[in-house]
Image: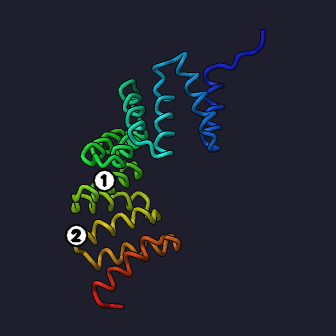
Amino acid sequence: PPHRLSENQVLQVAVKHHKNGNLKDAKDLYRLILSNSPRNADVIHRLGTMALQVEHYEKAEDYIGQAIKIGPATATMYINFGTALRNLERYDDAIAAFDAALKLEPMNADALFNKGRSLISNKQLSEAIEVNSRAIELNPTDAEAWVNLGAAQKAKGQRLESLYSFDRAARIDPDQNEAYHNMGTILLEMRMI
């Protein structure tokens, strides 16, 4: 009889397709695995991350929510779940998902970064400043985290602090257009240019 691939071997091929952007083949292989193991949380989560990649946020929420319920839930699952919820503008739910990730991994800079973005969107600026500052402590060279901090500071009226944060982002990543745009806006508001 011909050699059959194990489920783990099929998963490895699917993940390779997924990483290489061949989403259709990856999806077909993930579904093949689920036809034999319908409660495989890892594969269901991977379908959710694929939905996130193509901006199908409702589908992503559904898949990743299922994976979390089946378990064991990981910090990455909660971060991806929160990202889907944030993109659906369900900020309180997204913040709760990022908190769940941080409960599992308190030093997870990605969870802090994403929680900070959600807090800004939810107009919880003081907490956003605190959370983004913690993300920067964990990863001081993350230009996007500096932009997040600057955005929260700017929204709170802390112009000088936000200028510093945007300047840090631009120094870390000279292609960080959002930082330059915000610096220019603040300097115009302050009549400094």
The alpha-carbon separation of the residues under discs 2 and 1 comes to: 15 Å
Whole-percent x and y of residue 113? 37, 55
Give the quadrant of the N terminus: top right
What residue is disc 1 on?
118
Identify whether 87 is placed above or below 47.
Answer: below
Q: How is the image coloured?
A: rainbow
Give the quadrant of the C terminus: bottom left
Whole-percent x and y of residue 78? 37, 39
Whole-percent x and y of residue 85? 34, 44
- The reply, left or right, for residue 126 in relation to residue 144 is left
What residue is disc 2 on?
156
Mark 2 is surrounded, within 10 Å at the Cα level, by few (under 14), some (14 to 19) or many (20 or more) other residues, namely some
Q: Amino acid at mark 2?
A: Lys
Question: Which of the two labelled residues, at mark 2 and mark 1, occupies the earlier sequence position?
Answer: 1
- Where residue 76 sits, quadrant-wise, is top left
Identify whether 143 is placed above or below 135.
Answer: below
Secondary element under disc 2, as helix, strand or loop, is loop
* Extreme residue in the right direction: 1
Q: Residue at x 32, y 62 (%)?
A: 133
Q: Residue at x 65, y 19 (%)?
A: 6
Whole-percent x and y of residue 144? 43, 63
Identify whether 30 is placed above or below 186.
Answer: above
